[in-house]
Amino acid sequence: MNARDDEVILDELSPLLMDAVKQVRGTSVPINSQQRSVRTAKRIARRATRRRRYPRLALAVCASAAGILLLLSLLNVVGSAAAWADVVKAVGERPWIHAVSEVPGETNRLHVWYSPSKRIVASNIGVLAGYADLRTRIQYKYEASTNTVYRLPLDDAVEKEYIRTLAVWDALFRGDEISAAPLGDMQITRQSKRTTVDGDHMWTEYELVLQDAPETPPVRCVIRVDPNTHLPNSANFEGESLGPDLGKIVFKYDYPKEGPTNIFDTGVPEHAVEIDLVPSPELDKLAKSVASVRNGFDAYHALVIESGVKQRWWEAEAVYRVWKSGDRWRVERTTEMEKETLKSLGQPTAKEDPAKWWQKAAANLSFGLIFVCDGQHRYFLTGDSHHQHGIDQWKQGPPSLLPTAMPAGPELPWRMMPELMAYPVFGVPSTDFQPTLERKHTDGPQGTVRLTLRWTKPISSNKFDSRTFWIDPARGYVTLQWETRPEDHNPEDPQRHRYYLEGLAQTPGKLWYPTLIRWNVDGRPAKVVRYYCTFNGAMPARLFQVPGATDR
């Protein structure tokens, strides 16, 4: 497996799996074992794409605080039944709930704590730990590979998941009607109650069969309850839909009087380094403003012309066609056979309009599809022959345009899309970057603020040590320049890239974007990229479809 394939595989993983793989790579593990782990994670991720509900549930159970939240959700679904009334009441009156996972073949056990009254959720699985306070919206994350605790604002998606479950839970205790389905599209297709004896102890067992469609394999859940205390003792989940490498997950529950008051109480070493990554109000406003503009960018069709520094505007090394509408986009590139054609397009007249000239020229060029996103999944072509893209060469990725602020290789269309260059994804707040925002600087355009991001942990050879953005708040937070810089500069492998956004224009929605970018490498001119954009044109749905590539 080469470095490029490795990065492509990582890019396919969900954030949950990607974090786990990063932890494996941060420890001293043989390379063969690392590659096997990545391949296994990739198979699970693909299965999760095909069967979205159950594998998502399994992954969450195995790597988050879902052991307790899932129990609460299951109780909520059947909480209105009289048989569950005492169970729901008994659990809710406990100051803390503690769960421990048991997964066949796994030595590390997931410990989870939850306090209904304090609104605190904590977890520890050895290499990772977390502590979230829903009242203050602050969370702490521990990574064993760097022995570091990061303080962060609570992720919006995680917070919504917690709040959604806890709101249903609270409704139970108030006696209110539960309007939301806590398990999404999953339904209880069958349930039963029985009394069993294990040794000298009698238990009440509730068996639930969960399924979202008749054709999908069911998940069987057995919750064992102490008939004297009415408290759940264990929850056993079994089913093919939990994932090929899981199959069975057991949670054991107990109810301590006291729980963790901080992340160190979960078992994190006291000598762990602490890094505060909660952004300042000014940085928080900047990051959200940039994201808002990027996400709300006008629909457009663009011709993107990539030229060498000595080429004139009608000469090109490659031509791209881009369509973008909301969260759907498509990128095509001139095929290999067009390289010679691009050298002999002819010289335009002095009065020729560049945009119209390139529109006519592009009509006579051959293009091959290299990226497409249908709003649900992103597909990209592997291999070097862009004009020979059999379906087997397409790989599915997450729907996000850019998971981090870094241009991450050939599988991401960052340079072809003007809004990604003008409004980059900074990747903050996260455990990856330590941000510094400065109003005063001398190395960028006047009127801009400078945002510098540095890695918080050891980096591999294909990562940059820092990146810097010069952002203009007066023009809608458009980035005028940005630079990526390696930690150890190697003259034989130039990697210091700086992008100068010039010729700014506005969309019909009054958002700024570049019409020309000059790209320097190690201080020397490297390429020129020109953008000819048209807005509000018709974009049929077929543009954003990949025949035969769905549900792969």
Image (tube, grey):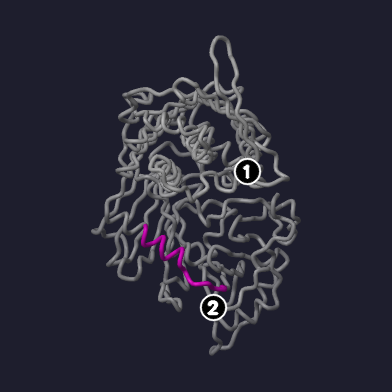
Quadrant of the image occupied by residue 355:
bottom right
Question: Residue 440 at x, y = what percent?
Answer: 23, 58
Q: 432 or 151: nearer the eye?
A: 151
Label 2: how many residues lie within 10 Å, few (<14), some (14-19) or many (20+)?
few
220 in relation to 357, above or below: above
Question: Residue 255 at x, y = what percent?
Answer: 40, 24
Q: Which residues are magenta?
A: 288-302
Question: Residue 87 at x, y = what percent?
Answer: 46, 30
86 in relation to 538, above or below: above
Q: Please identify the quadrant where the N terminus is shown.
A: top right
Q: Nearer the viewer, mark 2 or mark 1?
A: 1
Q: Find disc 1 in the rendering and name its residue.
A: 48
Residue 486 is at least partly visible in this image = no
Q: Residue at x 55, y 72 (%)?
A: 311
Image mark for residue 105: none
Amino acid identity at mark 1: Ala
User: Quick one: which residue is furthest to the left in this view?
Assistant: 440
Say left or right for 511 vs 543.
left
Image mark for residue 536: 2
Amino acid identity at mark 2: Asn
Please give the count of numbered marks on the rendered protein.
Answer: 2
Question: Residue 332 at x, y = what percent?
Answer: 64, 66
Q: Residue at x 36, y 57 (%)?
A: 287
Say left or right for 525 vs 290.
right
Q: Residue at x 51, y 24 (%)?
A: 225
User: Quick one: which residue is furthest to the top in this view?
Assistant: 200
Residue 27 is at least partly visible in this image = yes
Kind of element beneath mark 1: helix
545 in relation to 93, above or below: below
Residue 397 among magenta residues: no
